[in-house]
Image (cartoon, grey):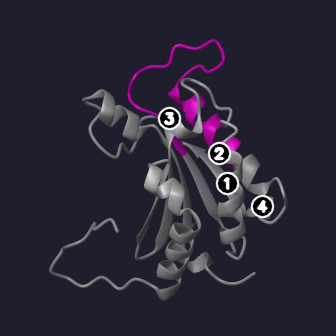
């Protein structure tokens, strides 16, 4: 749980948020334990965060093959959700040197789109309910002041808002 509020004030978390986060954690125990992804929740959403080094090769937006079965597991769990699911790609603050991507904006958007393609591939999730967004180096999790921190900031996040957690 990420605590973003006053620790003295109780925060009401919807039962459906806790249920979905629990289902994702249970279904992805090995990947969570390995650090390939994390599942967190806030009162209004569940966030599945993919570690960059386990998801993409450096400077590339093609999913590594081992991620496909993991995304299939996620799809089987979140297919019951209705409405908008946002997939956001993030980079660190170092400029990219690439013939394929003009900037970190291009790379982060392309990575988000790669994950969206996998989410909608088997049609369990309606393509019209998923949005891809590139965020480049905006909204870092931690300061970009070390190699370890820059690695944490390079990520893809699936955000499932609270209102969407209803059986299909």
Q: Confirm or deny contact between disc 1 and disc 2 (CB under 8 A).
A: yes
Q: Is-magenta flag for residue 144?
A: no
Q: Tell me how far mark 3 sits from mark 2, CA to CA.
A: 11 Å
Q: Tell me how far mark 4 sits from mark 1, CA to CA.
A: 18 Å
Mark 4 or mark 3, earlier in chain = 3
Q: Residue at x 49, y 52 (%)?
A: 37
The stretch in magenta equals 89-115
Q: Residue at x 54, y 61 (%)?
A: 159
Q: Is residue 135 visible?
A: no
Q: Secondary structure at mark 4?
A: helix
Q: Is residue 94 visible?
A: yes
Residue 67: which disc?
2
Badge 3, how many Cα within 10 Å: few under 14, some, many 20+? some
Residue 53: which disc?
3
- The picture places residue 141, in percent across and down from the top left corner, at 34, 46
Quarter where residue 102 is shown: top right
Q: For mark 1, what is the residue? A: 71
Which numbered mark, 4 or 3, is in the foreground of this view? 3
- The picture places residue 166, in percent across and down from the top left corner, at 65, 83
Residue 128: which disc?
4
Q: Tell me how far mark 3 sits from mark 1, CA to CA.
A: 16 Å
Q: Tell me how far mark 2 sits from mark 4, CA to CA.
A: 23 Å
Comparing 87 with 128, the one in front is 87
Q: Which residue of the protein is positioned furthest toward the left in this rendering?
A: 8
Which numbered mark, 4 or 1, is in the foreground of this view? 1
Q: Secondary structure at mark 3?
A: helix
Does residue 159 lie above or below 162 as drawn?
Answer: above
């Amino acid at each position: 749980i990420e605590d973003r509020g006053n620790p003295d004030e109780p925060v009401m978390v919807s039962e459906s948020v806790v249920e979905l986060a629990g289902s994702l954690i249970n279904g992805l125990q090995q990947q969570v334990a390995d650090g390939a992804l994390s599942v967190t929740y806030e009162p209004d959403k569940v966030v599945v965060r993919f570690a960059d080094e386990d998801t993409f090769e450096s400077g590339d937006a093609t999913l590594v093959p081992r991620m496909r079965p993991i995304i299939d597991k996620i799809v089987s769990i979140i297919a019951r959700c209705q409405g908008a699911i946002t997939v956001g790609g993030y980079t660190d603050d170092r400029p990219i040197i690439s013939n394929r991507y003009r900037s970190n904006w291009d790379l982060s958007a392309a990575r988000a789109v790669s994950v969206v393609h996998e989410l909608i591939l088997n049609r369990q999730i309606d393509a019209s309910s998923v949005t891809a967004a590139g965020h480049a180096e905006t909204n870092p999790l931690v300061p970009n002041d070390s190699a370890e921190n820059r690695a944490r900031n390079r990520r893809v996040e699936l955000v499932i808002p609270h209102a969407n957690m209803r059986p299909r």
